[in-house]
Amino acid sequence: MLSKLFGFDPSKHNIKTEVMAGITTFLTMAYILAVNPSIFSNLADKGMDTNAVFTATALAAIIGTLAMAIYAKKPFGLAPGMGLNAFFVFTVCLTMGYSWQFALTAILIEGFIFVVLTLTKVRTLIVDAIPASVKRAPTGGGVV
């Protein structure tokens, strides 16, 4: 069952090692459950519920990680990124003055656009058009 569901190969993997890796990944990612609601607490006076942010963060991490494990069969933990969340709160809502509802709508539309670009293979065409040196530059800190 583990082989079919997660791509677990007993000749390459050990249950104890995989469980320890899972616990380590969870503990590494768990900080987001405290920090993310803290970032969004700046919008509490505008009606955003901090407890709902906590729940949404946990659910997003669970769904993203399970999708990676079951669909992609890759050992990656996924959770909402704090950089984008900080941009959302401090730049879009507090500096630019947009409501958090408006900003969430923009993120929803952006998500649909990325799905459409991926399913229609347009994203692949765009990525293939980017020179290799530009793709590699961020991994070397900008040194090509």
Image (cartoon, helix red, strand yellow):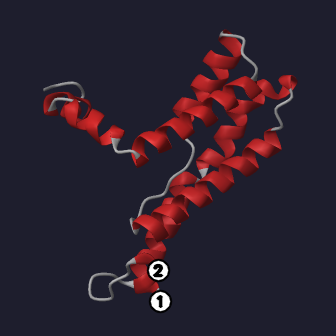
Q: Residue at x 60, y 33 (%)?
A: 109
* Vertical position of residue 65 compared to residue 124: above or below: below
Q: Residue furthest top?
A: 96
Q: Residue at x 83, y 28 (%)?
A: 44
Q: Residue at x 36, y 84 (%)?
A: 14
* Vertical position of residue 19 compared to residue 107: above or below: below
In the rendered image, is residue 133 in sight?
yes
Mark 2–mark 1 contact, CB under 8 Å?
yes
Q: Horizontal placement of 86 versus 28: left or right? A: right
Callout 2 environment at 10 Å: few (<14), some (14 to 19), or many (20+)?
few
Q: Horizontal placement of 141 versus 116: left or right? A: left
88 or 50, which is in the foreground?
A: 88
Q: Which residue is mark 1?
A: 1
Which SS class for mark 2? helix
Residue type at the position of mark 1: Met
Q: Which mark is residue 5?
A: 2
Q: Where residue 129 sits: x, y (%)?
A: 21, 31
Callout 1 environment at 10 Å: few (<14), some (14 to 19), or many (20+)?
few
28 or 68, which is in the foreground?
A: 68
